[in-house]
Image (cartoon, rainbow, N blue to C red):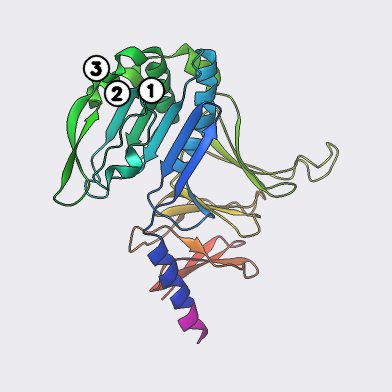
Amino acid sequence: MKHIFMLFLFSFSLLSAHKPKVRVETFGNVKTYFSSGFNFGEKTIESEELKMQIIGKLSKVISGKLGYSDTVLIERRTYNAHNPNQKLFILENNNSQYKIPVLDDGVVLKSNNNGLSIRIVSDKIEITDVLKLVEYSILNREKLNNKLISIDYYFSEKSKLSVLANTEDLIQEIIKKESKLIEQIINDEIVLLDNGSLRNEISWNNNEFIFSTNTKKLKDDNVYKNHYVNYRVSDFRYYIDSFDSSYFIIFNNTNTFTYFDGVNENTSPKINIEKKNGYAFKLIREKLGDKIILYDTPDYFYVYNIKKKLLQKIE
């Protein structure tokens, strides 16, 4: 009976994964919109979602240094459901109205005649590249709309919408140029997650994501102060935060992960997984001693032994 109940929970979770996660935030005059590639709840987070937080905070700094106070809208979707290989970049002046969220409804909302926007549909982004697009858009806002051309966007299998967008050549030309302003701010530390005393935290600095244990409330002479380590990675696919925020499962890609809880001997190398589909993994609610259970389908699950760093597939 327990197995049947567990399979029901797995199936329900997988069904909910088809609806993307949407995150809207405001950083001063900068607004960000993010739509994910999958949705497995608040504990399973794509790196692309974290990147939008970094871009939002640093774009606020860029706006301030360039003396631009009108709205900057940065929209981001990680996929086009009906044409996954299509990338879309739109740098637009005098319009900070949402556009990407309604494209799949076959609609383009009217301009609100205010601010400017940077809109992106792509699988992955580089933070520095997007910041260069923000800087370029502010400095060249009066010329932006002259660089838009009409392209076809498929919002269903057979239906398309004419959308004004930028060419790939223009985008590459912008991001290949060096920027002294971006070089100045790119090393700013950005805190992305802080779960409080002796809980895990995530920050970003010098183009690296840093997974670590929060030791802020420990005194400098505390014996545990230097006991904890951190895990640095330039990019990853997604991470899973445990329910008590005491450890992370960090998926470097869809087929390898690293277990991290701040203790050096527990931190694993990249553990390989045999996957049958493209879904992200989830954790069950409880850790069973030194073992955790990962699943992404009702057909099987994995048991990972933290101490032995071994993975066993159960079908």
Measuring 16% from the left and 43% from the top, which residue is drawn there? 160
> What kind of element bears circle 2?
helix
The amino acid sitting under disc 3 is Asn
Where is mark 1, residue-wise?
133
- Residue occupying image coordinates x 74% and y 45%: 227
From the top left corner, tell me how far across and down residue 63 is, in percent: 50, 19
Res. 143 visible in picture: yes
Q: CA distance from mark 2 to mark 3?
A: 14 Å
Given residues 171 and 28, the one toward you in this image is 28
**Secondary-structure class at tag 3:** helix
> Is 199 placed above or below 30 here?
below
- Residue plotted at (43% across, 70% down): 12
State the predominant SS element of the stretch in magenta: helix
Indicate the amino acid at tag 2.
Ile
The secondary element bearing badge 1 is classed as helix
Q: Are marks 2 and 1 in contact (CB under 8 Å)?
A: yes
Quick check: 108 above or below 242? above
Residue furthest to the bottom in view is: 1
Q: Which mark is residue 171?
A: 2
> Is 169 on the left-hand or right-hand side of 38?
left
Q: Position of residue 105 (x, y in %)?
A: 27, 48
Residue depth check, mark 2 versus mark 3: number of the one nearer the observer: 3
- Magenta segment: 1-5
Give the class, few, some or many, for how many residues have Cα within 10 Å of label 1's Cα (few <14, many ≥20). Answer: many
